[in-house]
């Protein structure tokens, strides 16, 4: 039976990255600057001024009636009301997607309150939904941490997989002095590498190909997830890179007890089979 081949492969699998609130929006801006390919970026915020500066492909202001474009004031309940008010706009933005990544800095107002609703909308549409969020630094205070924990629990109910990055652990992953600026860049790099790796796995040909169904089989209804990247060269490079990827001190999770694993390997053409 004859069939037509869709040469527009970019449109075969639609992946969108949604940054919710200030932290999520900043993460998206850094990903755009770093040149992440194969995905569409959407910024969702109550803060009209922040959206104006955003580098996202699509910008959605939520909760105009409840926040008047001035942000959620570090109140998750305001972020939740804002997303609820703008359900229709969020639904239209994610409709037709095969996979969405939702990123937010938990602990504040918009990201904490709105991210679970964005996830709920996406998952109810049958979209593979992955959350990648940060927890606040200890110096940000007990109230903000409690809000973050509550937001993460709510988000967990509406995503297929969830990666949590505690900002307090950022000091463990760099030998250089950690500043506020490079700390957030390190956290965002986890998101960038994860998104780019998944996009490349699905959209770029490899010696051993994975398709979107393979990715879905591992990530759907998976719960808390571990995401890591390892690089190495020289003797025992394969083992060193693998150990680095599975033992990232940045994440609270480990691969112990994992029900599924997705591995993306990039190497020189002369890599040995034993590696």
Image (cartoon, grey):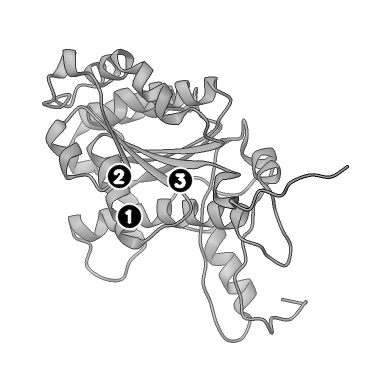
Residue 2: quarter of image: top right
**Dots 1, 3 in contact, CB < 8 A:** no
**Residue drawn 25% across and 18% down?**
82
Q: Nearer the viewer, residue 272 or 84?
A: 84
> In this rendering, would 124 be left or right of 61?
right
Looking at the rendered image, the quarter that the N terminus falls into is top right
**Mark 1 or mark 3, which has the lower sequence index?**
1
- Please give the label number shown on residue 56: 2
**Distance from the alpha carbon under mark 1 to that under mark 3:** 27 Å
**Mark 2 or mark 3, which has the lower sequence index?**
2
Residue 262: image x %, image y %? 64, 52
Whether residue 250 can be seen here: no
- Quick one: label 3, few (<14), some, or many (20+) residues within 10 Å? some
- Please give the label number shown on residue 252: 3
- Quick one: label 2, few (<14), some, or many (20+) residues within 10 Å? many
- Please give the label number shown on residue 32: 1
**Distance from the alpha carbon under mark 1 to that under mark 2:** 7 Å
- Quick one: label 1, few (<14), some, or many (20+) residues within 10 Å? some
Identity of the residue furthest to the right in this view: 1
């Amino acid at each position: 039976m004859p069939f037509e081949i869709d040469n527009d492969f970019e449109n075969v699998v639609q992946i969108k990255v949604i940054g919710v609130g200030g932290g999520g929006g900043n993460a998206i801006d850094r990903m755009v600057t770093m040149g992440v390919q194969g995905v569409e970026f959407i910024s969702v915020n109550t803060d009209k001024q922040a959206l104006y500066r955003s580098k996202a492909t699509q910008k959605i202001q939520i909760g105009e009636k409840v926040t008047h474009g001035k942000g959620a004031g570090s109140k998750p309940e305001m972020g939740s009301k804002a997303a609820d008010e703008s359900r229709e706009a969020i639904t239209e933005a994610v409709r037709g997607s095969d996979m969405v990544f939702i990123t937010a800095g938990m602990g504040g107002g918009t990201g904490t309150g709105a991210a679970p609703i964005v996830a709920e909308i996406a998952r109810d549409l049958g979209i593979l939904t992955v959350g990648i969020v940060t927890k606040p630094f200890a110096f940000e205070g007990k109230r903000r941490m409690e809000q973050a924990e509550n937001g993460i629990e709510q988000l967990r109910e509406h995503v297929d997989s969830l990666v949590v990055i505690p900002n307090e652990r950022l000091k463990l992953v760099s030998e250089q002095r950690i500043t506020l600026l490079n700390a957030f860049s390190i956290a965002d790099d986890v998101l960038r590498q994860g998104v780019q790796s998944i996009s490349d796995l699905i959209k770029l040909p490899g010696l051993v190909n994975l398709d979107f169904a393979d990715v879905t089989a591992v990530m759907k209804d998976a719960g808390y997830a571990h995401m890591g990247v390892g690089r190495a060269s020289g003797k025992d490079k394969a083992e060193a890179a693998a150990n680095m990827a599975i033992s990232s001190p940045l994440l609270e999770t480990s691969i112990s007890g994992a029900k599924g694993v997705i591995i993306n390997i990039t190497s020189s053409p002369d890599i040995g089979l034993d590696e």
